[in-house]
Amino acid sequence: MLSEANGSIAGAGALLNIMRDGRARTRAELIQLTGLARSTLAQRLDALLSRQWIVPTEEAISSGGRPAVAFTFNRTARVVLAADLGATHARVAVTDLGTAVLAERAAEVPIDRGPEETLGWLQHTFEEMLAETGHRPEEICGIGVGLPGPVEHSSGRPVNPPIMPGWDGFPVPEWLGSRLGAPVLVDNDVNIMALGEHWAARPEADHLIFVKIGTGIGCGIISDRRLHRGAQGAAGDIGHIQVASALDTVCRCGNVGCLEAVASGAAISAKLCAAGVTAEDSRDVVRLVRGGNTQAVQLIRQAGREVGDVLASIVNFFNPSVIVVGGDISEAGEQVLAGLREVIYSRSLPLATQHLTITGSELGDRAGVIGAAVMVIEHVLAPGSVDRSVSPA
Ligand SMILES: [Zn+2]
């Protein structure tokens, strides 16, 4: 932590963190909460006010005397640019510091067109939306991007992404950051979906697993309220865990027996095609299930059991309180959840399933873009980052 001796306002970030719940607080309340000396508190409040992280409001006091000045977190102090880039589909938003969406777009953007075309589109779209919401580029505090493949979190670069030709090692943060003039954070799509769902729908859950079943299968892990990325950012890649029912099936990763090779949207649509039912992708599968196609219903239930088989072990190992199921295939709703619950509740240890909730995603196809914003907000509002922002350069 920086010291006050060299001119920085150490501790301002910690103070802002207390105020993030949005409640207006007077100086007296803040002194009581923090134990800070009156002069120290004044110095930190001034620093936060000067950067507009907080704003003064008039708070009437109960005794009927004159109103005392109170302060609240200013969630409109900066804007966040967030993008969830999928295999074929992109969702983009401008949000405030509380993830309220100020503008949003969805578009068909095939990721296999390569990084420059895709990110060029993203830059252009962000600039348009920023203008639309009346914000200036200086107000952008950060840009969050989710990609449909493995990402090394420290560098923000994709690592051998199977469905993203041309993206391997591409410097996404540098490319986008230099054009939009703000720091860029990149993560894989399922990690940001886990962040979004946790923030918006399950903030009380300390340990949560978000499973995405779409063209591929993966999971995001919230452990002790924080995203667990693992040593290299590869944590949660359950799609390539071997399952007994898949031992004669070759996966796109080159191994045999991967979960993804039998239970993903791509695998289910291939099985339907082999049986003479036309289904190109996950969305077609869901359409067939909703239309009552028996083969599709059976296959999706079986896929639920196969994913459940892997999750049963993960439940024993990790003991989550909530499993959220998202991704295109989860739109088939109870048909997927039924197979999943069946296996998890029969195979996991009773203590681990006693209070376990298994549910569909509340945010649906917005989980990723909200999560991309959350990733930026948590970074920008981390006490150390706020301290640096109020320090004289
Ligand atoms: Zn595989």
Image (tube, rainbow, N blue to C red):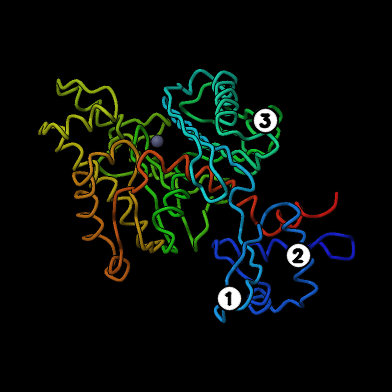
User: Is the residue under label 1 in contact with that under label 3 (CB below 8 Å)?
Assistant: no
State which tag comes first along the sequence, 1 or 2: 2
User: Is the residue under label 3 in contact with that under label 2 (CB below 8 Å)?
Assistant: no
Name the residue located 29 percent from the left edge and 65 percent from the top edge. Answer: 353
- Left or right of residue 297: residue 308: right
Numbered disc in front, either 1 or 2: 1
Name of the residue lying farthest toward the bottom: 63
| Rendered location of residue 317, percent (x, y) | 39, 61
Name the residue located 13 percent from the left edge and 31 percent from the top edge. Answer: 291
Name the residue located 15 percent from the left edge and 37 percent from the top edge. Answer: 297
Name which residue type carries label 2. Answer: Arg
| Rendered location of residue 150, percent (x, y) | 52, 37
- In the rendered view of the protein, which quadrant contains the N terminus? bottom right
Numbered disc in front, either 2 or 3: 2
Exactly how many numbered labels are in the figure?
3
Residue at numbered disc 2: 44
Given residues 121 and 353, the one toward you in this image is 121
Mark 1 and ligand 1: say if the CB distance to the nearest ligand atom is below 8 Å: no
Residue at numbered disc 1: 61
Residue at numbered disc 3: 180
| Rendered location of residue 61, percent (x, y) | 58, 75
- Left or right of residue 360: residue 297: left
Cα–Cα gap, marks 3 and 1? 45 Å
Mark 2 and ligand 1: say if the CB distance to the nearest ligand atom is below 8 Å: no
- Left or right of residue 374: residue 352: left
State which tag comes first along the sequence, 2 or 3: 2
Query: Badge 3, how many Cα within 10 Å: few under 14, some, many 20+?
Result: some
Cα–Cα gap, marks 1 and 2? 23 Å
